[in-house]
Amino acid sequence: MRMVSPERTQKWGEVELKAGDRYVLEPRGVPALLSKVDGMASVEPVVLPPYYPNEDYNHKTLTILRAGGIGDILMLTPLLRAMNDKWPEAHLEVCCGSRSKFALPSFVDWLPYPANAKELLERDSVLNLTDVIETEFEKHGVHAFGEVAGFNNLPLKLIYEPDSSLVGDLRIRYPRKAKARVGIQLKASSPIRTYPNMNEVIYLLVAKEIEVVLFAEPHTIIIDRPHPLITNASSDALDMEDSVALASLCDCLIAPDSSFVHFGCAMNVPTIGLYGSFSYSIRRTEGHPNNYFIEAKGECSPCNHHGQGGEAWPSHGPCKRSGFCNVLAGIPAERVARKAIQICKV
């Protein structure tokens, strides 16, 4: 980890990094911050308060540092539950980005990332989980996190329950248009995990009189062929928490290897997950009995490409030339739609 002190105040998501204060960042986040402040910052190594698996953390503050995406935070929840069971009097907190804080269980507090160094270094212990799953291609992410913390063979059941009042509000705002409703996440956070045939799936479903709700970043979906049964949730600029609450009202979710697969499993909504660049065996979790995972096969899969350093595609692979994952493209849209229709029983 690195300690960075910017010479001018700079916003980082919801966090205001104040000039002269020191903040703890993972190494790959430092160049991004330096570019924002035109290099006007000092950078130095930092030693975090150590974590010992056999320590008794009751009546102490234990901070888990993980600056990854929302899916990573959900993968942490089995470990957080195990820690809470083992040390019920501990003060547990997770240091992560502001966009991910809503996914934390109610028994865990949030510490903004980048963390103020003075605050973080005053903690009794910091469990640093930076790059744990980015460098582990054999173990499930839940197990990789758990083993670093000294908790082996954690259950693959994630924790998340949407706010009931929010779900009720969205039920009113988005009344059903058909007997069955399928939610679809159009894109993963990395293009190599995005299923290129999703548009075909959408129109196969509406042809069967199934309502399709499309989820994506706000205002990023343009529907070429509008249809009364297509609901574009992106056009209403729903944030991630709202989108997940609306997804809980679907009869089935379809998503590439991404956060919506994890949320679907956590909320026990029947979920179809599409995998290519990573093996589903190290990504899938427990959920509804009708969950269905399709793993595309090919000579270059799984490539385990995380897209670090801004490289969307592996440097020596067919997807760099085509602009999409050729392996994922090999999953027929008809197969995906057929399974969704079967789950919806229409």
Image: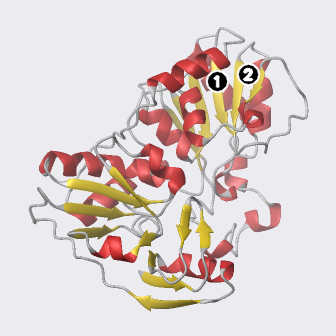
- Quick check: can you spot residue 140? no
**Amino acid type assigned to the residue bearing label 2 in the image:** Leu
Residue 90: % across, % down: 17, 54
* Image quadrant containing the C terminus: top right
* Residue in the foreground of this view, choosing between 114 and 316: 114
Q: Residue at x 79, y 33 (%)?
A: 200
From the viewer's perspective, is 333 left or right of 113? Answer: right
Taking depth in this image into account, of 68 and 325 the one nearest to the observer is 68
The residue depicted at 52 percent of the width and 40 percent of the height is 261
Residue 190 got which mark? none
Q: Residue at x 47, y 75 (%)?
A: 25
Q: What is the number of the mark on residue 182?
A: 1
* Quarter in which the N terminus is drawn: bottom left
The front one of 312 and 68 is: 68
Residue 7, placed above or below residue 258: below
The image shows residue 298 at horizontal and vertical percentages of 63, 56
* Circle on res. 205: 2
Q: Secondary structure at mark 1?
A: strand
Q: Quadrant of residue 129?
A: bottom left
**Considering only vertical position in the picture, is 233 above or below 321?**
above
Marks 2 and 1 close (CB-CB < 8 Å) = yes
- In percent of width and height, residue 282 lies at 42, 53
Q: How many marks?
A: 2
Among numbered discs 2 and 1, the one appearing first in the sequence: 1
Q: Nearer the viewer, mark 2 or mark 1?
A: 1
Residue 309: image quadrant is bottom right
Q: Is residue 85 above or below residue 11?
A: above
**Callout 1 amino acid:** Val
The outermost residue toward the right is 224
